[in-house]
Image (cartoon, rainbow, N blue to C red):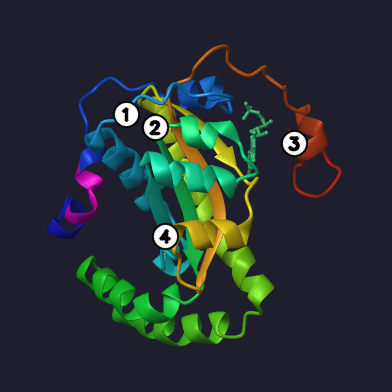
């Protein structure tokens, strides 16, 4: 790991502690209905966050921004912005996953600089300098939100599975009011709130397993309608 990675905490992913395997984490994760509210160790939170920051993103532009809410008063405010969902206040931490509509404008140079340091070919860098503004500056607001949703949810999913692997429980949420969350967190106007991710430990019984559709309903091989072999 290089110095830059150390700054954002990627080194915390090189842990020697026992974690669930990825398959276990995927199978055992449930959308947690209620949390016990116990504090989360700062180093655990760093590891969860670092897993998100390690996610892939379009052109490596990392347009995500996360606000981690742990304070009691702030959790109350956030709960009020999230249709009064109790788990927002009960969770040890709520990671508010946002995208910055203007992130690419500010970060393009930095992305290229870091890329070049890591071995990005100059031809690729030159192309990115052209293609990124050409592509993104024409986006409508809705298209930009769609693009942010894609990128931010991958990072949020990394965090969710890392938390599960470490023995925490999580709850992803879309039940919130955009403007109210912005106000509670004093977010800049260019921020778009994508999801809330509550992290902590389950209190009481876990949620039922709702099952999944059989594979032929949602997965095709080669073209629509053909079964995956
Ligand atoms: C994008 C997204 C938004 C969600 N929003 C909420 C929410 O606001 N409140 C809630 O109780 N559950 C929410 N959920 C949890 C889903 O209801 C849950 O994942 C689904 O029922 C499947 O259950 P499981 O995650 O336990 O397998 C959300 C899940 C996702 C992925």
Helix, strand or loop at mark 4? strand
154 or 1, nearer to the observer: 154
Quadrant housing residue 60: bottom left
Q: CA distance from mark 1 to mark 3?
A: 45 Å
Q: Earlier in the sequence, mark 2 or mark 1?
A: 1
Ligand 1 lies in quarter: top right
- Residue 224 relative to residue 42: left or right: right
Please report contact status of discs 1 and 4: CB closer than 8 Å, yes or no: no
Q: Earlier in the sequence, mark 4 or mark 2?
A: 4
Front: mark 4 or 2: 2
Helix, strand or loop at mark 3? loop
Q: CA distance from mark 1 to mark 4?
A: 23 Å
Magenta stretch encompasses residue 182: no
Q: Residues within 10 Å of mark 4 (few under 14, many from 20)?
A: many
- Residue 14 relative to residue 89: left or right: left
Front: mark 4 or 3: 4
Q: Is residue 88 above or below residue 165?
A: below
Q: Is residue 111 above or below residue 169?
A: below
Q: Which residue is mark 4?
A: 65
Q: Which residue is mark 1?
A: 39
Q: Earlier in the sequence, mark 4 or mark 3?
A: 4
Q: Is mark 2 within 8 Å of ligand 1?
A: no
Residue at the spot 34% in from the left edge and 45% down from the top edge: 49
């Amino acid at each position: 790991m290089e110095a830059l990675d150390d700054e954002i905490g990627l080194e915390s992913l090189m842990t020697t502690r026992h974690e669930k395997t990825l398959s276990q984490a995927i199978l055992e994760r449930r959308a947690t209905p209620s949390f016990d509210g116990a504090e989360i160790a700062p180093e655990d939170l760093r590891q969860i966050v670092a897993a998100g920051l390690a996610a892939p993103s379009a052109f490596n532009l990392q347009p995500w921004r996360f606000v981690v809410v742990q304070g009691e008063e702030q959790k109350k405010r956030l709960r009020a912005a999230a249709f009064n969902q109790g788990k927002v206040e009960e969770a040890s931490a709520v990671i508010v996953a946002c995208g910055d509509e203007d992130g690419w404008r500010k970060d393009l140079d930095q992305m290229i600089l870091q890329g070049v340091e890591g071995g990005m070919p100059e031809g690729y860098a030159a192309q990115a300098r052209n293609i990124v503004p050409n592509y993104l500056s024409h986006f409508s607001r809705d298209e930009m939100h769609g693009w942010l949703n894609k990128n931010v949810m991958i990072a949020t999913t990394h965090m969710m599975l890392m938390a599960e692997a470490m023995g925490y429980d999580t709850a992803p949420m879309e039940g919130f009011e955009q403007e109210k969350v912005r106000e509670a967190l004093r977010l800049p106007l260019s921020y778009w709130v994508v999801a809330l991710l509550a992290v902590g430990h389950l209190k009481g019984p876990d949620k039922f397993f709702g099952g999944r559709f059989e594979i032929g309903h949602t997965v095709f091989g080669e073209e629509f309608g053909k079964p995956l072999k």
